[in-house]
Structure formats: C-alpha cells, structure tokens
Amino acid sequence: MSRSDLPALTIAELQSLLRRKEVSPREMIDALRARIENVEPKIDAYLSIDFDAAAKEADKADVDLPLGGVPIAIKDIINVKGQPCTCGSKILANYRSPYDATVIQKLRAAGAVPFGKTNMDEFAMGSSTENSSVKVTRNPWDFSRVPGGSSGGSAAAVAADAAFGGLGTDTGGSIRQPASLCGIVGVKPSYGRVSRFGLVAFASSLDQVGPLTKTVRDSALIMNAMAGHDPQDSTSLNEPVPDYTKNLGRDLKGMRLGLPKEYMIEGIDPQVKSAVDTALKQLQSLGAEIVDVSLPHTDYGIAVYYFLATAEASANLARFDGVRYGYRAKDPKDLLDHYGRTREEGFGAEVKRRIILGTYVLSSGYYDAYYVRAQKMRELIRQDFVKGRPRRCPRSNSASARPIRWRCIWPTFSPIPGISPAFAGSVFHAVWRK
C-alpha cells in the first residue's frame, strides 16, 4: 500500500496497520496532511489545523490503546486545549480554548489524536454549512452541492478521506443529515450518553456529541471511547457503557423495525424514497421484520423544535457580550452601545434570527402561550416514540437536504439514539478516489 492510499483506510484498518508496526502514527499524520493539502482547496472542510501539535502528539501515541495513534477531526464547537474554538462565528474569531472538553479527554485517554477543527454553521444553527462566517464547505461528491449541516465540515472531511473519523454535534439532525448527504455514517447518541462538558451550547436539552465515520464499526469504536458518565455534566447518564462493537456483523433475525407512516408523505424526494426502499429490502434480507407504526404528533415537530431550540439559544448566547472574551465593538459610546454593537457585528444573520425568535418566545405574555405549550407537545412526541418503538430514523443520500432535515427533528425529542448509515457509501467512495 502506497502512502497516498493510507487516508482511505477506515479506523479499524488503520489500527491493524499501526499495531503490526507496518506504519507509524507520525507517518499517518504526514499522509493525512498530504491528502488535506490536495483536497482542502476544493471542499473547505477545515477552519484550522495544527499539524505540528498533531505530529508531536502522534509521536507519543500508544498504538495498543483502543484508538492509539488515530487522528480524529473535531467540529469547531468542541473545546480542545490551546486550539481555536470559533463556532464558525466572528464573535469568537480569536478565541482559543483554555481546556479540553470531556470528549476530548476521553479520546486522548484512548490514544486518539485530535486533529484539526472543522467548519460548521455558525453556533450549529443551520443545515448546509453555508451559515459559517468564515467560508462555505462543499460536498466532496459534487462541489456545486452542500454537505449538509451543521456538522458539514466533519462530514465532508471524512467523505473526502481528509479525516479517518470526526466528531460532530446534533441538535436537530446536525450529525445524521450531513452524514446522509455525504454518504458516510453518523450517530446521534442517546441524550446523556456522551458528556456535553466543553461543548459550546446551542440548545442544552437537545445538543449531543457523536461520531462521523466511514463505517458503523468505526463509529462504535469512537463511542466506546467517549461514552460514559461525567460528573461535570449534570445531565450525564450514570450507566455502564456497553461494548458497541459486540453485536456487529450479526444478522437481524428477531428485530422489529418501525417505519413511521407519517414520514412517507406525498412530495418526498424520489431519490430519498428509492434509497429508503432499498435499505428496507436489505434489512429484510438480513432477517429484520419491518412493521408500520404511527407517530401521530409528527406534524408538530418543526414548530416545537423552533420554539424550544431558539428559546434555549437565546439564553445560552447571552454570554457572548464582548466583556470577558471574543469580539468587541470598537469605541462604544456607553455600555448599552457596547453590548448592542458587539452582538450586531459579531453574530451572523441566522444566529440573530434565532435569538430574536427565542427571546420573543420567552418574553412576558408569550412564555405560556408558546414555550410551555411546546414543552407539553415535546412530551407527547416523546411518548409517540416510546409507544411505537421505531428502531431507525431512515436516511439516504440525496441532493435534497430539506426533506431529510425535518425527519431528523422528531427523534431528537425522543429517548432513542439515531444513526445515518452509509447504504451507498462504498460506491461514492470509489467515484471520489478516481
């Protein structure tokens, strides 16, 4: 295998080479650097990369650890000590993190090398990575199309072999949707399974950190490393972490998978429908039983999401005022002018829209009418999933991001995890490498 072929490896394949001493962690970093220098001008997946720091960390890596020597791309909303954490926003353009997020600590403890900060929609608000204040990321399979979002940078990097695996965050589909559009695997863990400490908050009751990888096994390996209880996160689940690789490779006999009839609506993109049908046939061939289920409150999902997510965003983003860190307006007339101009100049249009909506939802006279009612409807949506017990959120590769995006929102309110499997990933992978 030539050096130029190394970045196309999966994490599991890379581990095998590293442990057999056929390649060193430093050689992997060098090969990845060459690949990034080749494809990054075309896709713009990264916001910053510290090659020297990554190389030094790789030299010390213990390849016998679960992720020993494996470079992992990090969405630029997760704090990595000494590295930028801009959230794709002008208001944090020069900010460098003074600490590691818990997920970074866990990855490092497992031997992984955090490698580069990837582009994203500003503060994770968007579904195309076009809302970044820095640049627009392109889909590796078609540069005229979006990679999805808000974790589009990590998804595009993995799909283009510019990363072996990456971390993203999911509030309303921001891992699953870009994974689908880029033909890779994306996992939104159950809420509380992965610590949010060190994740810059968008909507705290919805945000989750999860992996973006080339295969399901690779996602399982990363989940094994970063899942688990964290006393620094009050919402962290204090339960044992299973071995997520244990049941891989088995058939699906005895498993019943629910197909929500409300998702198969008129107007669905033909490519989406075709890919879902293909996936269903494949699941059935593996022994799964496909059953129709109903999620009767589906129609309320989008409204509930926008009320709750924007309300939480309004509160969480109040901290960005230019007083302690981040962008600061020049020569303010007074404190009020300082606050107003700093936020006006520092935030992008989409972030401002969501702050305005969230502030309105929480304002006196509207709190009960909108926010409280949305919370009640959220519970009804959650109960739909508990009663129906669907086991999958169908996804596919399609140029049409919008229909897929909305299907990601409803599982966000439920107690179940979600995954976007790469049904045709190997086909697209071959096309890109040519």
Image (spheres, rainbow, N blue to C red):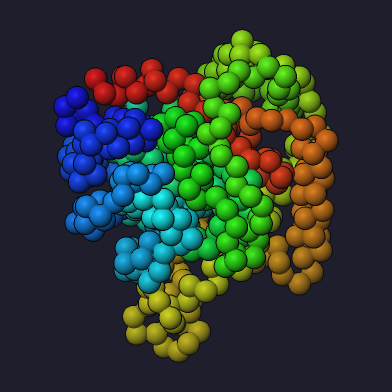
Residue 384 against residue 264 in the figure, above or below: below
- Give the image location of residue 45, x and y in percent: 32, 44
- Return the residue nearer the eye: 417 or 220: 220
Residue 313 seen in render = no
Name the residue rendered at 64%, 19% in the picture: 252
Residue 267 against residue 30 in the figure, above or below: above
Judge left or right: residue 380 versus residue 120: right
Residue 256 against residue 89 in the figure, above or below: above
Name the residue rendered at 29%, 51% in the picture: 61
Judge left or right: residue 141 versus residue 415: left
Name the residue rendered at 68%, 41% in the picture: 416
Quadrant of image for the C terminus? top left
Classify residue 38 by image quadrant: top left
Classify residue 365 by image quadrant: bottom right
Name the residue rendered at 41%, 64% in the picture: 100
Residue 224 against residue 213 in the figure, above or below: below
Classify residue 342 by image quadrant: bottom left
- Give the image location of residue 213, x and y in percent: 43, 36
Judge left or right: residue 90 versus residue 389: left
Quadrant of image for the N terminus? top left
- Return the residue nearer the eye: 284 or 350: 284
Q: Seen from this angle, which residue lies furthest bottom?
A: 334
- Return the residue nearer the eye: 418 or 90: 418
Judge left or right: residue 1 versus residue 46: left
